[in-house]
């Protein structure tokens, strides 16, 4: 079947919103899923932020820093880029209907310096986690952290997952940038969750703090206090073997995986981030 016929079939089978996204993709523009660049037809950067949503995002970012709900590097990014921009009003939060963002709960638009999201629900851990994901993208932009799409997405998704794990008490920050793990069996967790667990566990053994590894996995071993080089190697191997599944997980979650087949998303695409331009 020729690509042309496939496109016609796809177009006839898809809802209008997805057709618009595909249409833009074919026109050389990129629809926003998780992160993207989306300029209006005229190219004008006419977009208005919602102060009430920005206030919610600011509350989430400030609490994440104060309560150490995200890793140290994320707290630095929030403090140096995101919080000042939200306070200054130069990072926009634009409230949209979920149906207007095909396949994604929220997106960061690095051209418009705007997060487009359905109303943020401060009582929902999931909504807060997704907001932090987009705030990480805004921080990456502010820091002009030019990255391949897959690296940019992996970072943001890991923060989202780690925030929820810290909220559940599975992960807790210890001294010296170490992160303690407290869980019975991690085998049933998501792949990204497990990569984080094994990565932190290896670092704990390396730092002589095997006491922080209070967990078990499918191996049936109890790791607390085990400081052998074998167990450290085991953690490193597990982090590596789980990385592939983890990538699939965030690719699906951020809709990259689903879009790759249609050529809409290129994970190796280099994202030129021009900073938070209204903040200058
Ligand atoms: Zn993203």
Image (cartoon, rainbow, N blue to C red):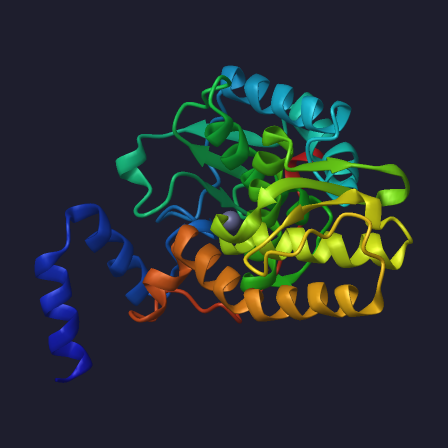
- Look at the image and tell me whether residue 271 can be seen: no
Tell me the residue at 83%/45% (across/down): 211
- Quarter of the image for residue 2 reads bottom left
At horizontal 65% and vertical 34% (from top left) the residue drawn is 166
Is 192 or 52 nearer to us in this picture? 192
Q: Give coordinates of residue 13: x percent, y percent.
A: 10, 58
Camera-side residue: 48 or 189? 189
Confirm whether residue 201 shows in the render. yes
Locate residue 1 relative to residue 123 in the image: left or right: left
Q: How many marks?
A: 0
**Vertical comparison of 176 with 234: above or below:** above
| Location of the N terminus (image quadrant) | bottom left
The correct choice, above or below, for 197 with respect to 229 in the image is above
Q: Left of 137 or right of it: where is 120?
A: left
Where is 255 relative to 148, above or below? above
Position in image of residue 112 (x %, y %):
52, 42
* Residue ID at (91%, 53%): 208
Query: Which quadrant is home to the C terminus?
Result: top right
Report the side of 125 relative to 229 (left or right). Answer: left
Which residue corresponds to the image point at 50% horizontal and 45% vertical from the top-left?
109
Image quadrant of residue 8? bottom left
Q: Position of residue 227 (x, y in %)?
A: 85, 58
């Amino acid at each position: 079947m020729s690509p042309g016929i496939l496109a016609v079939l796809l177009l006839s089978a898809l809802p209008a919103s997805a057709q618009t996204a595909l249409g833009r993709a074919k026109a050389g523009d990129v629809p926003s899923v998780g992160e993207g660049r989306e300029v209006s037809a005229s190219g004008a950067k006419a977009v208005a932020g919602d102060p009430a949503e920005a206030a919610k995002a600011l509350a989430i970012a400030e609490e994440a820093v104060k309560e150490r709900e995200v890793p140290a590097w994320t707290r630095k990014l929030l403090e140096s880029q995101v919080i000042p921009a939200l306070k200054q009003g130069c990072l926009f939060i634009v409230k949209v209907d979920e149906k207007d963002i095909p396949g994604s709960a929220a997106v960061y638009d690095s051209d418009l310096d705007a997060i487009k999201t359905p109303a943020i629900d401060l009582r929902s851990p999931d909504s807060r986690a997704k907001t932090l994901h987009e705030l990480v993208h805004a921080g990456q932009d502010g820091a002009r952290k030019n990255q391949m799409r897959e690296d940019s997405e992996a970072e943001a998704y890991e923060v989202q997952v780690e925030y929820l794990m810290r909220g559940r008490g599975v992960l807790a920050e210890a001294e010296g940038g170490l992160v303690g793990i407290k869980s019975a069996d991690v085998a049933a967790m998501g792949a990204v969750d497990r990569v984080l667990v094994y990565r932190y566990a290896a670092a704990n053994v390396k730092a002589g703090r095997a006491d922080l590894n209070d967990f078990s996995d499918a191996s049936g071993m109890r790791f607390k206090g085990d400081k052998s080089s074998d167990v450290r190697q085991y953690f490193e191997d597990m982090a590596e073997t789980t990385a592939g599944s983890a990538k699939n997980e965030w690719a699906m979650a951020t809709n990259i995986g689903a879009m790759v087949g249609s050529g809409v998303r290129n994970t190796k695409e280099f994202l030129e981030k021009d900073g938070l331009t209204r903040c200058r």
